[in-house]
Amino acid sequence: MKRTAVLNVVGLTESLLGPATPRINQFLGRGAKANIVPAFPAVTCTAQSSYLTGTPPAQHGIVANGWYNRELAEVQFWKQSNHLVHGRKIWEELRELEPGFTCAKLFWWYNMYSTADYSITPRPIYPADGRKFFDIYSWPYSIRPKIKKDLGEFPFATFWGPAAGVKTPQGARDAASRWIANSAKWIETNHSPTLSLVYLPHLDYNLQRLGPRHPDIVQDLREIDAIVGDLLDFFAQRSVQVILLSEYGITQVDAPVHINRWLREERWLVVKEELGLELLDCGASKALAVADHQIAHIYLNDRSIEKKVRATIESITGVEKVLNRAEQAELGIDHARAGDLIAIASESAWFTYYYWLNDSLAPDFARCIDIHRKPGYDPVELFLDPKIPAVKLKILRRLLQKKLGFRMLMDVIPLDANLVKGSHGRRPDRAVDFPLVISSRPELLPNGQVSSTDVYHLLKRHVLY
């Protein structure tokens, strides 16, 4: 077996390669690349699960970054248990072929309770009094105190939210990806795994915040190129081959679609008042949408209205198509967790989770970073509310309240979905916006394109031959 490191450079596409990526260009010049026909939907959890099982969502079950749990009548996003991913994982097959094989899974999703030998993933600590402490989870447990002693605390605030991808007191623009890269070096130095899976999210933030056409993206490309170049040098010194890949390509958007508001207008979606604010009542709704970037799963608690719901959604500007169960099967996503219908946005559009009609009635979590409580993905969490005067002073005041032991709400996130300029999830119209795989061993890389499920076999060949 050949020891291998897989660097998952989130958002990297052929269209982004150029003068700002000299180290990646050099690596490509010594090898070859192929476009990856994106997983559907082209979102983090689905793409990674397809790569690591070699199967589509219809089999591995990860139909998006989150979905509606019909039994609990709850939307559940960004869960971390690897038991949610059905099927044999690549490290399990390779371990069967070679008993000495080991795998490190560094910040890839579904990283808790997997059978990987070493893992690190972000995981806050929640005491019973309502406080929240940023931290990481590791397996074995012994890794956590040792790596934090050597590398310092993981800069959690730079991993997601308004501090991600920008210079703030919480860290440098590339702080999260730099820490993860250093953790990969630490794991390699201390454990020398056969296969290292390394997640580098730096490009993801400003590509969503600003869009791929914004001139400031050049700086992000330079920064991730430097991180990748440093890892290429490090792994080369230790005779570890490297594969670069990405999960999806981010394209320019300018049209948020508030799909749940349409369902509410038709009186299919039910909202209840609590403490003067509005909360979505999933179990009482006849239909609800779980929005995730450019796709939305539509769940029907009343199947008799399916045709009416489909017709309504198809009439919305910004919706490209709607898939029923039979059409989902053609795309390999006909799983019990999937919506009864799936809406796909036009390339310049994306779906919000918003269901309130008046911002003054929005739930308290809407103005916070709260990825688990929101019934859908919210890229607006990348912004500070421009309508709040001296918003950074408000943040300092909230932090002081927290330090003094008071309950506080970090309510600094805007409710303006028009701020978002980049998204993903549907298959881009141009192949140059597909995700990429780059290898220094062109003989193992098919010409042209590979499917998302074929990435599994491509990685396996690199390790075995």
Image (cartoon, rainbow, N blue to C red):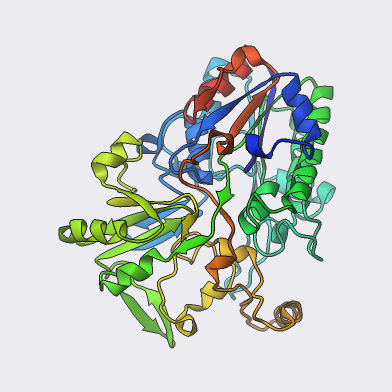
Q: Residue at position x 54%, y 30% from top?
A: 36
Q: Quadrant of residue 462?
A: top right
User: Vertically, is 384 above or below 240?
Assistant: below
In the image, residue 362 above or below residue 299: below
Q: Nearer the viewer, residue 94 or 241?
A: 241
Measured as percent of width and height from the top left, residue 43 is found at 51, 46
Query: Which is more toward the observer, 96 or 417?
Result: 417
Quadrant for the N terminus, please. Answer: top right
Quadrant of the snapshot with the C terminus: top right
Q: Quadrant of residue 17?
A: top right
Q: Position of residue 169 (x, y in %)?
A: 82, 66
Residue lying at the far bottom of the rendered structure? 276
Say which residue appears at 25% left-offset and 44% top-offset.
325
| Residue 130 versus residue 236 in the image, above or below | below
Looking at the image, can residue 62 be seen?
yes
**Can residue 343 be seen in this snapshot?**
no
* Count of number-bearing discs: 0
Residue 141 or residue 63, whichever sits in front: 63
Left or right, residue 151 beside residue 277: right
Q: Position of residue 330 (x, y in %)?
A: 31, 35
Residue 18 picture location, percent across and down: 74, 36
Residue in the picture at 76% in, 25% down: 27
